[in-house]
Image (cartoon, rainbow, N blue to C red):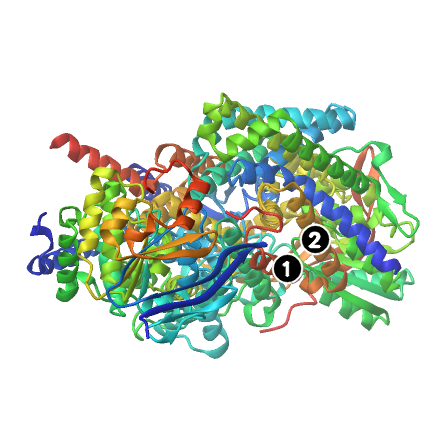
Amino acid sequence: MSETTLNPSASTPLWRRSVTRDLVAVLILAAVAVALFFLFPSNLALLTRIVAMMLLVLSLDLVTGYSGVATLGHATLFGAGAYAAGIVAAKFGITDPLLMLAVGALAGAAAGAISSLVILRGHGLSQLVLSIAVVSLAHEAANKLSGWTGGSDGLSGISPSALFGMFRFDLFGRTAFIMSVVLLLVVFVVLRIIVRSPFGMLCRGIKQDPVRIRAMGAPVYFTLVKMYAIAGAVAGLGGALSAIATKVVGLDSLSFTLSAEALVMLVLGGTGKLFGALVGTLVFVWFEDRVSAINPFHWLTIVGCLLVAVVLFAPKGLTGAAEAIWKRMRGARS
Amino acid sequence: MSLFEVKNLRKNFGGLAVTDDVSLSLQKGDRIALIGPNGAGKTTFVNLVTGHLKPLSGTVHLDGQNVTKASPTQRVKQGLVRSFQVTRLFSEMTPEEHVALAILQRLGRSGHLFTNFKTMPEVVEEIGSILALLGLGGIARTPVAEIAYGQQRLLEIALAMALRPKVLLLDEPAAGVPSSDTVLIERALAQLPPGLAVLMIEHDMDFVFRFAQRVVVLAAGAIIFDGTPAEVGKDARVREAYLGSYADDRSVA
Amino acid sequence: MQTILSIGADALSYGMVLFIISIGLSVTMGLMKVVNLAHGAFAMIGGYIASYATQQMGLPFGVAIIAAVLGTMLVAVPLERFLYRRIYGAPELTQVLMTIGITFAIIGIANFAMGPTLKTIALPSQLQGPVDLGFRTIAAHKLFAAAVGVVVAIALWFIIERTPFGVRLRASVDDAAMAGALGIRTKIIYAVSFALAVGLAALGGVVGAQLLPIEPYYALHYMVTFLVVVSVGGAGSITGALVAALLLGAVQTTGRYLMPEYGEFFFYLAVIAIVCVFPNGLMGRSK
Amino acid sequence: MSKLLLASLTLALTSSVAFADTIKIGVVGPFSGPAALQGKNFQAGIDAWLAINGNTIGDDTIEIVYRDLPAPDPAQSAALTQELIVSEGVQYLAGYYYTPDAMAAAPILEEGNVPMVVFNAATSAIVNASPYVVRTSFTTWQTSTPMAAVARERGIDKVITVVSDYGPGVDSEAAFVAGFTEAGGEIVESVRMPMNTNDFSPMMQRIKDSGAEAVFAFLPAGPATLGFVQAYVENGLKDAGVTLLAPGDLTQEPDLAALGDNAVGLLTTFHYAVSHDSPENEVFVEAASKAIGSASELSFPAVGAYDGMYVISKMIEATGGNQDAAAAVEAVKGLSWVSPRGPVSINPENRHLTQNIYLREVAQEDGQYINREIQTFENQGDPGWKAP
């Protein structure tokens, strides 16, 4: 029986170690962002779009990867954020980008909490179908309320004012990109803290065995609703970011297609890991963009084959495969 | 007033009475064994009193309060904790995290978003002492999927202890454990706080005799015997109930 | 009264079309436990084969149906052997990723090989035009689809419940290891049931092509519809799929007649209500 | 991954500096996805123009840069447009099949000093989104309005409108209802159908029950039109003499073969029929058919692209190849020429085409189904446009 691993004095360094790891993770992300900024100065709009998608996929990871909720309707939360931010800007003149982000996060959180009340009624397949029904209803509602949303023509007339009154959203998309990267870093750190918090552990427990969680006296339903609200805020930020950077919000931001794409990106990167969400999104969108630029007529076949290859050769996603290789290399060395 | 009191509990599945007018009470510090042939309704009884099933009629009182209508989680919060016959653990999480979750839940901190149990000295200390007590200190950071089944059963007990219940219902704590390791489980149960009332469902009669001060026998949903371990083997109805179902069982004399 | 009868006839025929294209998916999802999002892609392949056979080769409709079913099965065999076999028993999300990938690839290939335009299947003259039901006329091909649906339901029920193959299939699904120990070659059983499901998809694609026209994005357009019918009915249940298809067909048809503006709302609200009350589907076995 | 990045980086660098006197035109359209056929038509129109006129204007060489946008996706549209301007250095933007995609590109034009020629997107308000937008297609208002007159001329008093429930459908309904009621007709009912409707029988029942003499319908070109026309015939509406009137999206040429005999006799109003009888169209159809591979796939977006290329060539001539969006747009205001669809001109007020709208009847000719033009509404502007 060893006491070494678990005496209180050892806990502080342990906790510090995780802070150090957070710092390293943030530094890596920031370095990648800076490198992309200088390597691809003319692709910043695409990169900003990738960051917005990353927020959506991170949000999906919270409910699917960490809490075990199967959903093909996650764009509901993204679209809620995008439309809320777009509507306050286009109809109420609230054009400050930070305020728009806040509105998007709030709307996303509300949409998350409300939609979870329906989605959490099912399990497995029925949960997937409920989530599809929810996103389809939201899509129809947005199409119907064309006075507010612009319907299928899209919501235009969004002109965000300069960030802090100083940095205009320029043609090159520099302001939008830098803002989106800072936003992503902040969200990433907050989520790292949340997934390790008691609440995050509770969610992981629910994913693996909700009955056991109840036997511990912890609420399953309420916990998941809360997680959905948090995920909603993250996805809502992504939506608002997209509205600010694009200046138009379309019905596609509230679609089954976007939801399914987000799920594909998450599984591609690896579920239950925040890095997995980021890697999956970056690789998928970049791959899609490149392949479709090289051969716009037949890229779908190539993307399809990529997905099949991932299931065959990296069933735990790209990060899972990387981890396995890393472990094998370390094993070989020692 | 008893610490835990079940009165006239009834439950039917279809037309079949699976719990038939069961009354039972536990006092502080009790060690009671609930035995009975397969299909006697033992697990149903646990599910009824913990609130996972709704009874047709009857009441459940815990520490003087009527909890018949309370949800399972409310009952846990009031001190009624159960373990599972088949291990229910989180396969990707470590024993340390399991116990942490139980302690945080007891402390009402399990919903906290921006804290980490590793920064709470008192929690870390308690995790250490519980795991050490049960001999799980060495594997505190190994995912549960990778530890031995006997250790998983011990972790079930650790979780129950971390919740600091008033009444503990153990559903076959040694089920599936190789007989050489049962002694570890027994030793762990001996570490339970003396004031805790324990109701244990168990098949292994030797284990029951060593553990229980009192034995309750359930057959076809009804209590047919309630007395000391010494008396149970001599009771005619118990013999009939067991011999009727599995005549060649070695554990019942 | 006239109107109610008329809507009833529409609902019934539409429901039967839904049934006939969804039932194959119910087999894969319920019995083989594979979330096969590529189901629509197989239906589409069937449709293309039938279209090519009738329009380009001038073959009769009956021959085209058989060619479509067999041809699609032929395409599916290697896919089952090399791809699907790898995801039996895998987590749902993995199955979703793989089958979406297969769908994308098939769409891309169809677009390349058959072009982006609509393809139709030439119907024999008996199935063209309206049939007088007394209180109204209805398209002959709809009646045909309904009749095929009834035949498929009965045949499938017979195969699964009454034949040695059905017994082996159910045994393999419930406990593959035990079935293997009893000498059942589960790999073959799975391959055959997959081919059966794909054949049903192709049949549905051909028979339903008048309502769901064949074009490359067929596989994505109707993916949700198939999923919804199967899960509302309860995966693996023939009666469940039938009841769900008729019920949803009725909701959608009535909604389209009474309040077309809100037709989709009715449909999805009905889905939510049913799934909330019956989480395993109308006739699904609880897990 | 890094190889991919490197490859695209070198691509980006070489393409922006290597050809100094090459004028690049960025074309955004649906080259894959459900509307891939329309994207192919964009390309066919462009290729036809290049084949007839060559790829040089003055001493400048034209180069086309294609970007795929398979479905309405404004975020992707903005990203592609920005990348075309900033990294590819295009001087002109063109294409845009869907309205939200054009709307998302419009805010970037002024800062990028780039004019945009819309080849298709048909919502009236797009031209208001930026002064640098010129459109060579049509608007749904423009093609739907004349149908009201057609209906009245044929003595139809009561009409039910049935449209797909999205922007263009709503525009089409509004245009027809406005024109028809003004001409003294009565709209007995207006029905909007969900976009993904596939069984139209209940709709036909409703049309029957409404007691209307004719039905005005709008559906986007593509799969749904097949089911709609089929249901119209199978439910006995055609035999009962209920006339079907629609803008030409319902009977675009590539869909006609699938619609078959069911469509014969249908009346549609549109700005272009592949069968239009003029020497200009003959030249165009020959070149465009060669470009697209099969004449049966030729459709209206091709002529939008062809005329768009003409407008861009005039812009390049006027600016001498220099990048000056304001001057380029100014130069084509009021421009008039004879397009394959007939005589057209650019209205200086809204930079949209004034053109003939034709009433066509689906007919069979030499074993092919065609939209035969039977009546012309000359010099139609965009009745849906409101000055900002």
Residue nearer the viewer, C265 or D300: C265
Q: Amino acid at mark 1?
A: Ala
Q: Which residue is mark 2?
A: C247
Q: Chain of mark 1?
A: C
User: Percent position (x, y) of residue D45?
Assistant: 61, 43
Q: Residue at x 83, y 59 (%)?
A: C4
Q: Amino acid at mark 2?
A: Leu
Q: Which residue is mark 1?
A: C270
User: Percent position (x, y) of residue C187?
Assistant: 49, 24
**Residue C81 higher or lower than A152, as above or below:** above
Q: Contact, CB < 8 Å: mark 2 with mark 1?
A: yes
Q: Is residue D83 visible?
A: yes
Q: Residue at x 73, y 59 (%)?
A: C256
User: Percent position (x, y) of residue B181?
Assistant: 21, 41
Would you say D113 lies left or right of D258 here? left
Category of crowding for the residue at label 1, using alpha-carbon neighbours closer than 10 angstroms: few (below 14), some (14–19), many (at least 20): some
User: Percent position (x, y) of residue A99?
Assistant: 37, 74
Q: Secondary structure at mark 2?
A: helix
Residue nearer the viewer, B25 or C257: B25
